[in-house]
Image: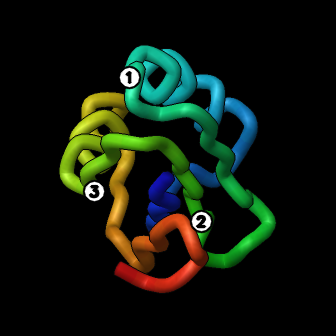
Amino acid sequence: MKVLKFKTNINCGGCVKAVTPYLNSDESISKWQVDTNNPDKILSVSGEELEPHQVKNLVEKAGFKAEVVRVQGIGGGDL
């Protein structure tokens, strides 16, 4: 399983609600969350066949920005 982390401009509950249908529609995403309390508004996404560009595209389709800050593998190490 991969865990991808993105710096975003998803900064409130309304923004999370707006991006939800896009992220929930991708079958390769098993879990996601946005830390709106973090200054970088970190989006964490986990799943088996995840690629950073596909998550970035989904977030951008919802009208937000996403920049990859970290990619982790099964053991927690960076890929």
CA–CA distance between discs 2 and 1? 19 Å
Q: In 3D space, how far apart are the residues under numbered discs 3 and 2 (Cα atoms)?
A: 14 Å
**Three-letter code for the amino acid on which mark 1 is drawn:** Asp
Pick whichever of labels 3 and 1 is earlier in the sequence.
Answer: 1
- Mark 2 is on which residue type? Ile
* Circle on res. 52: 3
Q: Position of residue 75 (x, y in %)?
A: 58, 75
Judging by the rendered image, the residue that carries numbered circle 1 is 26
Mark 3 and mark 1 in contact? Answer it, CB < 8 Å.
Answer: no
* In this rendering, position of residue 41 left or right of residue 28: right
Q: Are marks 2 and 1 in contact (CB under 8 Å)?
A: no
User: Could you say where residue 44 lies in the image, as x and y percent from the top left?
Assistant: 58, 57
Q: Give left or right: position of 64 versus 17.
A: left
Mark 3 / mark 2, whichever is N-terminal: 2
Residue drawn at point x = 34 percent, y = 70 percent: 68
Element type where label 2 sits in the image: strand
Where residue 14 sits in the image (x, y, percent)? Answer: 67, 31
- Measured as percent of width and height from the top left, residue 61 is found at 26, 30
Is residue 76 positioned above or below 19 on the image?
below
Any mark on residue 42, and which?
2
Q: Nearer the viewer, residue 14 or 42?
A: 42
Q: Nearer the viewer, mark 2 or mark 1?
A: 1
Q: Tag 3: Cα neighbours inside 10 Å, few (<14), some, or many (≥20)? A: some
Q: Please, which residue is most extreme toward the bottom here?
A: 77
Can residue 60 be seen by looking at this rendering? Answer: yes
The residue lying at 46 percent from left, 69 percent from top is: 73
